[in-house]
Image (cartoon, grey):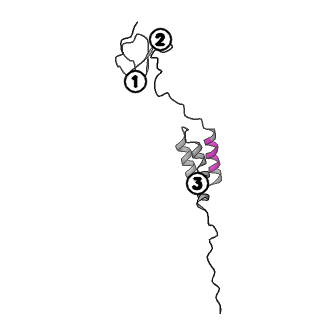
Amino acid sequence: MLIATVRFIPFFHFHPIFWLVSLFLYFLPAFLARNKPDFISILLLNILAGWTLIGWIIALIWALTSKPQAQVPAQPPANPQSATGGYFCTACGQPCPAGARFCSACGAAQPATQR
């Protein structure tokens, strides 16, 4: 009796590009939320419940509706005198009223200015 040999052909043979595209689409909500203040929460929701379609949609909507983080200037303005006539502390960067000799926030001595 002749026994037919069946060659194993994998039914789900995916190309590596397919895997990369799939991972990108799966983590799309986290990618969109990377500069938002609730990035960690969206990432956790995406990881833990993203495999369900509802969890992924909720994470995507949350990522799209979340407001971006407020950008804080890295340095005080080049002109140390503010619009109100005050100065910025050279130690901590907090505004100080005009004529103050010490910073009210950190207590650092302010440089002498022309009065």
Residue sitting nearer the eye, 13 or 57:
13
Residue at image point 63% right, 83% down: 5
Asked if marks 3 and 2 touch (Cβ < 8 Å), the reply is no
Amino acid carrying label 1: it is Cys
Give the mark nearest the N terminus, 3 or 1.
Answer: 3
Q: Is residue 93 left or right of residue 14?
A: left
Q: Which residue was labeled with disc 2?
A: 85
Residue at image point 40% right, 24% down: 92
Give the mark nearest the N terminus, 2 or 1.
Answer: 2
The crowding category of the residue bearing disc 3, from other C-alpha atoms within 10 Å (few below 14, some 14 to 19, many at least 20), is few
Q: Secondary structure at mark 1?
A: loop
Q: CA gap, disc 3 to disc 1?
A: 44 Å
The crowding category of the residue bearing disc 1, from other C-alpha atoms within 10 Å (few below 14, some 14 to 19, many at least 20), is few
In the rendered view of the protein, which quadrant contains the N terminus? bottom right
In the rendered view of the protein, which quadrant contains the C terminus? top left
- Give the residue at the far top of this rendering: 115
Q: Secondary structure at mark 3?
A: helix
Q: CA gap, disc 2 to disc 1?
A: 18 Å
Q: CA gap, disc 3 to disc 2?
A: 55 Å
Q: Which residues are magenta?
A: 56-63
Task: Please provide percent x and percent y for residue 71.
Answer: 53, 30
The crowding category of the residue bearing disc 2, from other C-alpha atoms within 10 Å (few below 14, some 14 to 19, many at least 20), is few
Give the mark nearest the N terminus, 3 or 2.
Answer: 3
- On residue 23, the disc is 3
Q: Which residue was labeled with disc 1?
A: 92
Amino acid carrying label 2: it is Gly
Q: Is residue 84 magenta?
A: no
Q: Secondary structure at mark 2?
A: loop
Q: Is residue 86 above or below residue 13?
A: above
